[in-house]
Image (cartoon, grey):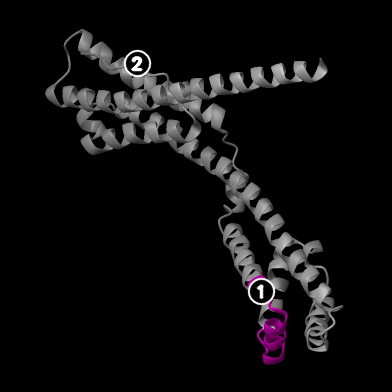
Amino acid sequence: METIIISTPRMVNELHTQFHQNVLTLIDRIGPQTLEIEAIHTPYKKAFEEQQEALLIIRKSEVTAKIAEQDRTRDGIFRGFVDTVKGGRNHFDPEIRNAANLLWNIFLHYGNLVRKSFNKQTAATDDMLRKLESPDLQNAIDVLHVRDWVDKMSEENQKFDNLTHQRFNESAGKTTFRMKTARMKTDKFYRVLTSHFDNLLAIEATNPVMNEFIIVLNVIIKKYKDILAQEFVRKNKMKKELGEVKKELEELQKKIEN
């Protein structure tokens, strides 16, 4: 028996972090003292904590991208609402024109929301939505049949506000840890761990608890090797399909040129 070899560098960041978390959870469950690996466990755990912090930075950037995308979405809704009301101002029905002009005055009061900063736009939109709850404006909304625009603007503004609350605190953004370096350190101590037990196995110096640990560790490794294998097959399939599409496009281009 020996520990199964796995290529941790092939793992994406989330999978890599999850793998090491599973290994450390196993160690904590049995106890580093019981396994006689305190000297290895301490720096391994510290390296893993640095990796977790580095992953937070990556996820923060993902949230930032989602915030920008959501801002574009709510801007589009606001512009569509404004254009719809603007069209009503030229309607032949005086009741519709009056309703449109009432709402238009609200737009004039708050100005172009899309030009405001993120937080100011969120606050101004919330305030505008509260203003639109007044009876006369509620009637104008019904006359113009723009209730769906109001509801959608409220929905998208709330989504944006929810995303901004997912931002990580400023101190997380200032951390000096980065994923590439953190992963290398975590992998280094993991290799020290597996080499330690392989050396003990080679000289038959393990005890029953250590043997049980190695068995369960190999189950964890096997699970992640299967995940990597599935991912490899999926990527190869996608690569093949993209190659076929590229070939078809090249053939089509030749036909067009001829």
Q: Residues within 10 Å of mark 1 (few under 14, many from 20)?
A: some
Q: Circle 2 is placed at which residue position?
A: 5
Q: Which of marks 2 and 1 is nearer the N terminus?
A: 2
Residue 86 in percent (x, y) is at 83, 73
Above or below, comparing residue 250 to residue 231 in the picture: above
Q: Residue furthest bottom?
A: 135
Magenta span of residues: 133-149
Residue 203 in percent (x, y) is at 19, 8
Quarter containing the C terminus: top right
Q: Image quadrant of residue 17?
A: top left
Examine the structure image and report whether residue 138 is included in the region drawn in magenta: yes
Residue type beneath disc 2: Ile
Please tell me whether the stretch drawn in magenta is mainly helix, strand or loop.
helix
- 130 horizontally vs 258: left or right: left
Q: Circle 1 is placed at which residue position?
A: 150
Q: Which residue lies furthest to the right in this view?
A: 90
Taking the image as drawn, is residue 189 in sight? Answer: no
Q: Label 2, secondary structure: give it.
A: loop
Examine the structure image and report whether residue 188 is included in the region drawn in magenta: no
Residue at image position (17%, 26%) is 212
Residue type beneath disc 1: Val
Residue 19 in percent (x, y) is at 38, 31
Q: Which residue lies furthest to the left in this view?
A: 208
Disc number lying in front (2 or 1): 1
- In the foreground, 57 or 144: 144
